[in-house]
């Protein structure tokens, strides 16, 4: 990964060229804090984030795209200037503290993205390929692919620190080079506002078909979040005991999904049996077709009922 560690000073800042946005002059360069993303500086009237290892341009594009900026400016504390060095190397923000992420603020943000057609259709293959890449790199024992509901939509990938977009995690940028939109519900689950968020969103995008275990839903999104947290822990040498404990239980959960899918095997048998009974009845080959109809209909009903009752409740995964 490209590495940019500048000799930070007022002279260095004021001498930078090629910046975008309303680039300010620095009145001072006072370090506020260092995080895994980068170094935060007080530069006078504004604050700046210097990212030694840029992870992409997901943050700057929210301001540099005029239509996207106009749509999101009321919801997010956006950077208004910056500098590219293999991605977002410097981002300049207002000094205002970002608002807390709440169900209300996140729902309004997501509805704005939907209304502005910034959302994308379900990307089941892209999301599963992304997880496979992470699993293969981390050499985890747990492997999980999932189908996703048609109504599980994607939104532009950006990370939130409060209601302020910041660069995506270093580990994610290393492992997945594609700029993939991720499921909208992932953000609500990550910030622990899912249940209240659901009540504020259109039912089409937050209904049972989006949440349920059989279509990926909450269980699989939770796996995604934990797996990427494991990657971040590996990258920075952080304790991952709690994550490892979660991952160790995934196999048992997948066994429940196996039983659930096994229950559904009677459905195709029932359908084929009904069709066969109908054809044999039309050909005059059987004298009492009602026995066949009842038998295969019951098999179909029992199979579907068993499938429904053995599906793990997604609420238990919260």
Image (cartoon, helix red, strand yellow):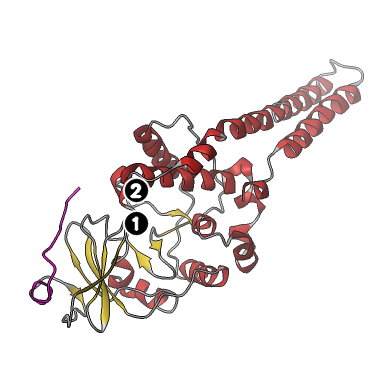
Q: What's the residue at 34%, 48% (across, down)?
A: 172
Q: What's the residue at 65%, 32% (across, down)?
A: 256
Tell whether 246 sits left or right of 88: right
How far is mark 1 from mark 2, CA to CA?
7 Å
Q: Position of residue 293 (x, y in %)?
A: 85, 27
Res 146 visible: no
Q: Quadrant of residue 59?
A: bottom left
Query: Which of 114/296 is in front?
Result: 114
Q: Position of residue 71 (x, y in %)?
A: 41, 75
Q: Is residue 12 magenta?
A: yes
Query: Which of 70/313 is in front?
Result: 313
Q: Quadrant of residue 135?
A: top left
Helix, strand or loop at disc 2? helix
Q: Residues within 10 Å of mark 2 (few under 14, many from 20)?
A: some
Q: Which mark is residue 172?
A: 2
Which residue position is annotated with label 1?
168
Q: Magenta segment, which residues?
A: 1-15
Res 53 visible: yes
Q: Residues within 10 Å of mark 1 (few under 14, many from 20)?
A: some
């Amino acid at each position: 990964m490209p590495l940019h560690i500048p000799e930070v000073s007022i002279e260095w800042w004021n001498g930078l060229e090629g910046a975008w946005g309303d680039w300010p002059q620095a009145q001072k360069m006072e370090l506020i804090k260092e995080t895994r993303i980068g170094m935060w500086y007080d530069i006078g009237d504004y604050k700046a984030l210097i990212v030694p290892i840029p992870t992409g341009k997901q943050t700057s594009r929210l301001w540099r795209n005029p239509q996207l900026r106009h749509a999101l400016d009321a919801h997010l504390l956006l950077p208004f200037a910056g500098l590219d060095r293999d991605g977002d190397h410097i981002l300049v923000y207002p000094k205002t503290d970002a608002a807390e992420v709440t169900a209300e603020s996140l729902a309004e943000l997501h509805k704005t993205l939907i209304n502005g057609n910034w959302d994308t259709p379900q990307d089941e293959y892209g999301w599963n390929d992304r997880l496979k890449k992470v699993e293969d790199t981390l050499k985890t024992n747990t492997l999980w692919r999932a189908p996703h509901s048609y109504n599980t939509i994607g939104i532009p990938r950006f990370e939130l620190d409060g209601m302020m977009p910041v660069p995506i995690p270093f580990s994610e940028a290393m492992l997945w080079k594609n700029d993939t939109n991720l499921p909208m519900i992932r953000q609500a689950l990550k910030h622990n506002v899912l249940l209240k968020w659901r009540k504020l969103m259109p039912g089409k995008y937050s209904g049972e078909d989006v949440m349920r275990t059989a279509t990926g839903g909450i269980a699989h999104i939770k796996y995604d979040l934990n797996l990427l947290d494991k990657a971040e822990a590996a990258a920075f040498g952080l304790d991952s005991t709690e994550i490892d404990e979660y991952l160790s239980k995934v196999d048992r959960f997948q066994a429940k999904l196996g039983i659930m899918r096994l229950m559904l095997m009677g459905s195709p048998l029932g359908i084929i049996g009904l069709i066969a009974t109908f054809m044999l009845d039309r050909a005059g080959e059987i004298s009492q077709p009602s026995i066949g109809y009842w038998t295969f209909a019951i098999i179909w009903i029992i199979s579907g009922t068993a499938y429904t009752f053995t599906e793990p409740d997604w609420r238990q995964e919260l």
